Every structure is written in structure tokens, then in C-alpha cells.
Image: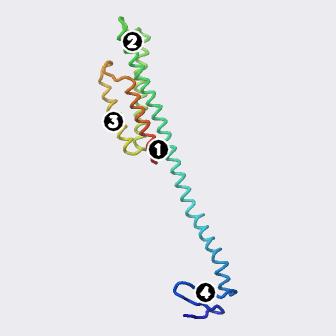
Amino acid sequence: MQWQIGRVNAVMNWWEWKFEPGTILSYLLGSWIPALLTIGIGGLFATVIYPNLASLISERRRIIERRQDVIVHSAVAFRKYRIAWRRLMDISRQEEETPDGINDITRKRKEDIIASRYKTKDDLIAALMSAKAIFDLPAGEVIDAFFEWDENLASKRLEELPDMGEWKKWEDLLSKELQRGLRVF
């Protein structure tokens, strides 16, 4: 099939168009159409794709930074809580070993340690609840298991309390689980 468009003879096969060189249409198709396509695709990238991609990257970076802050806060709070428990256990052992009991200064120190333990427990609960809200299910399950374990300690006597190695295991387990949640994202 063949027909004439102005001075351009176009031959149409089913799969291609052929234009005679030197015509206006061949000049437009050879020079202007690629440039216009480049401008159109570049404009689409610059106005739509790049801003969306930049906002996704920025949002992901913000979430990762928030998760890192929660991990650090949780680790610091757990360490303080573990130290408060160790101090309380040490002063309670000292109280049991001393035949006359402890003096007023040591008793006051023990009361301060108990008060600080409650405050550090509140800080730890707040940090771990933030972590539970931000991280996925496996971290939440470990946090719940720790809360259950910790609640069981409240009713135990000094000789029934676990040693500091058990506390360290929980600290390591929570830290690893939270860091795993950071890597998954």
C-alpha cells in the first residue's frame, strides 16, 4: 500500500514506515521527535518520579533513625534497671550478713536504691513499650516474655532471685531482637 502525504511518499508495511530523506517529515522525525521525547521523559522524571523517590528515601531514613533512638534508649534503660537490681541485691545481702543489721546511712541508701529501681523500671517499661510499638512481632513477643519474667521476680525473696547472668541474657536477647528489627527494615 502506498500513498502520498504532501511531498512525502510513505510506504506502509505492516511493521514499518519509510520516509524519503530530505523531506520535512523525515527531518522532524529524525531531529525533533527524539529531543521532545527526551524532554518529556526527563520532565516526568524530574517532576513526578524523583520527588516521590526522594520522599520515600527520606521517610525510610527517618524511621530508621527513630528505631535507632529507641534501641539506644532501651539499652540504656535496661542497663540502669539491671544495675539497680544488682545494687539492691548487694545491699540486701550485706544486711543479711551483718549481725546487727545495717546502720541508718546504709538503710537510707537502700531506700534510695529501691526508689531509683522503681524509676528505672518505669523508664525501661516506657522504652520497651515504644520499641514494641515501632518494631515487628518477634521483638514484641520477646518484650512480652521479659515483662512476664520481670513480674515474676517481684514476689521472690532475695535467695530466689536469679543471678546477674540471667539479667545479662535478657539484655542481650532484647538487644539482638531489636537490632534484627532494624536490619529487616
For this view, does 86 lie left or right of residue 56?
left
Q: Earlier in the sequence, mark 1 or mark 2?
A: 2
Q: Are marks 3 and 1 in contact (CB under 8 Å)?
A: no
In terms of image quadrants, where is residue 139?
A: top left
Q: Position of residue 35 (x, y in %)?
A: 65, 74
Helix, strand or loop status at disc 2: helix
Pointer 2: residues within 10 angstroms few (<14), some, or many (20+)? some
Mark 2 or 4: the one toward you: 4
Q: Which residue is mark 1?
A: 182
Q: Are marks 3 and 4 in contact (CB under 8 Å)?
A: no
| Residue located farthest toward the top when viewing the structure as drawn | 100
Q: Which residue is mark 3?
A: 145
Mark 3 or 4: the one toward you: 4
Pointer 3: residues within 10 angstroms few (<14), some, or many (20+)? few
Between 53 and 1, which is closer to the camera in this rendering?
1
Which residue is found at the position 64% from the left and 91% from the top? Answer: 8
Helix, strand or loop status at disc 4: strand
Q: Which residue is mark 4?
A: 18
Q: Earlier in the sequence, mark 3 or mark 2?
A: 2
| Residue located farthest toward the right when viewing the structure as drawn | 22
Which residue is found at the position 44% from the left and 11% from the top? Answer: 105
Q: Which residue is mark 2?
A: 94
Between 75 and 162, which is closer to the camera in this rendering?
162
